[in-house]
């Protein structure tokens, strides 16, 4: 069932002791009287920071979000209770029909065999079962209560890390190494200007973000029939997400309404991208084939194959993580404005510590040949937390699970793992 919230009346209706219809963004009484409709300011609650393993990638530090760049000043439409639910807590549970099937966790044990890499017909991360969207079947009452606002801050910090370092937890440092597409260049420069904005130029930057998002939505999507086309499609999805994030959470009611109209487009593009990757089987020879080479020794053949598979994993894992971020942010926004969100399905992502930060194909292959888990369900952390040590998991995975099971449980998991290692 969807979560129910107690929305307070706007200030004008409360002061006049009149009934308020509590509509967003303005109630009808204020509209009829041409009055400013302002709802009570929601209270913010802060959580203690969780300990994390140090990785090259800069992940959000929860204690630093008190000085968040985003302006939530006009988010007066939300009551304080709106921010105290977990991402799962306000999702409508999914009840599969007789024909629906959901992939289980067999991919957790999928490990690459080093000796057979040249003959591997399909990499472990392209297997059909790893691309089945899984749906939450938990009742809301069974889910731990977690604040939603910190997830927005966490994604904001990821975007700022992209501006500072050229990469983040869902945009890999090697993703655009052969050239950043124009649409991503535009989104990057807009985000950089927004991150370093002053009050004098803020409205100009927001206008640029709005116009560029409109222009991007008017463009035709490239045919996603190969790795390069998938990369071009991913670039557009990530670019549109940057514009949407700025407009949805900047605090401007006008921009928020504009971004809401483009949310269905972003969702549809993400679905089309996901379906394209599901169909992809390396038929364009993206990984490991060099047809122009006339003589190749065994080392070069192994190197070409492992490098190609590594680059393909970077592409597909970027798709997975981008889908996780976009779906969760869209769901969080709907929960904050409507009180509930549909469960659109959860992806599997790579959990093995060090794979995202690997500097070479050799290091990536070495970690891929290690013990599981590799790919894990994003919305099913419970069994994995009880079975594996925290240091075996990527920081992005632990960060995301913090908003699923709560920071206290994740911290206990980390502390228990550390105590076991010391023993």
Image (cartoon, grey):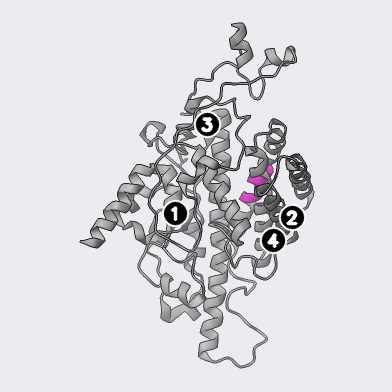
Q: Secondary structure at mark 3?
A: loop
Q: CA distance from mark 2 to mark 4?
A: 14 Å
Tag 2 residue: 186
Please tell me the numbered disc located at residue 397.
1
Nearer to us of marks 1 and 4 is 1
The x and y percentages for residue 56 are 48, 64
Q: How many marks?
A: 4
Q: Which mark is residue 232?
A: 4
Measure the alpha-carbon separation of dots 4 and 3: 32 Å
Mark 1 vs mark 3: give the one in front.
Answer: 1
Dot 1, how many residues are within 10 Å of its Cα: few (below 14), some (14-19), or many (20+)? Answer: some
Contact between marks 2 and 1 (CB within 8 A): the answer is no
Q: Is residue 70 left or right of residue 101?
A: right
Q: Give the alpha-carbon distance from disc 1 to disc 4, as whole Å.
A: 26 Å
Q: Which residue is mark 3?
A: 340
* Camera-nearest label, 2 or 1: 2
Q: Residue at x 59, y 25 (%)?
A: 77
């Amino acid at each position: 069932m969807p979560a129910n919230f107690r929305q307070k009346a706007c200030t004008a209706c409360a002061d006049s002791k009149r009934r308020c219809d509590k509509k967003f963004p303005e109630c009808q009484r204020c509209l009829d009287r041409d009055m400013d409709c302002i709802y009570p300011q929601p209270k913010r609650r802060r959580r203690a920071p969780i300990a994390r393993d140090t990785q090259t990638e800069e992940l959000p530090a929860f204690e630093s979000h008190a000085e968040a760049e985003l302006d939530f000043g006009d988010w007066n439409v939300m009551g304080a209770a709106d921010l105290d639910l977990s991402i799962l807590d306000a999702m409508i549970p999914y009840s599969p029909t007789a024909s629906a099937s959901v992939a289980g966790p067999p991919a957790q044990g999928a490990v690459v065999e080093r000796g057979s890499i040249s003959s591997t017909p399909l990499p472990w991360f392209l297997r059909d079962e790893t691309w089945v969207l899984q749906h939450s079947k938990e009742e809301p009452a069974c889910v731990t209560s977690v604040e939603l606002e910190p997830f927005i801050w966490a994604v904001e910090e990821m975007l700022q890390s992209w501006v500072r370092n050229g990469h983040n937890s869902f945009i890999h440092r090697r993703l655009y190494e052969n050239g950043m597409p124009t649409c991503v260049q535009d989104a990057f420069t807009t985000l950089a200007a927004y991150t370093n904005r002053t009050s004098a130029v803020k409205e100009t930057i927001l206008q640029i973000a709005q116009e560029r998002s409109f222009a991007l939505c008017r463009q035709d999507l490239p045919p996603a029939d190969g790795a390069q086309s998938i990369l071009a499609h991913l670039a557009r999805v990530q670019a549109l997400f940057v514009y949407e994030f700025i407009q949805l959470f900047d605090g401007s009611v006008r921009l928020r309404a504009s971004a809401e109209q483009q949310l269905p487009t972003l969702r549809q593009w993400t679905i089309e991208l996901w379906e394209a990757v599901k169909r992809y089987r390396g038929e364009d020879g993206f990984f490991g084939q060099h047809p122009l080479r006339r003589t190749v020794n065994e080392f070069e053949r192994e190197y070409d194959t492992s490098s190609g598979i590594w680059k393909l994993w970077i592409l597909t894992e970027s798709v997975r993580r981008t889908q996780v971020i976009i779906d969760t942010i869209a769901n969080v926004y709907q929960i904050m404005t409507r009180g509930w969100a549909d469960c659109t399905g959860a992806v599997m992502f790579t959990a093995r510590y060090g794979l995202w930060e690997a500097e070479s194909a050799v290091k990536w292959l070495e970690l891929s040949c290690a013990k599981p888990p590799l790919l894990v369900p994003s919305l099913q952390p419970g069994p994995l937390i009880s079975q594996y040590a925290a240091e075996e998991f990527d920081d992005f995975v632990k960060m995301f699970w913090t908003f699923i099971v709560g920071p206290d449980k994740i911290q206990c998991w980390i502390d228990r793992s550390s105590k076991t290692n010391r023993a």
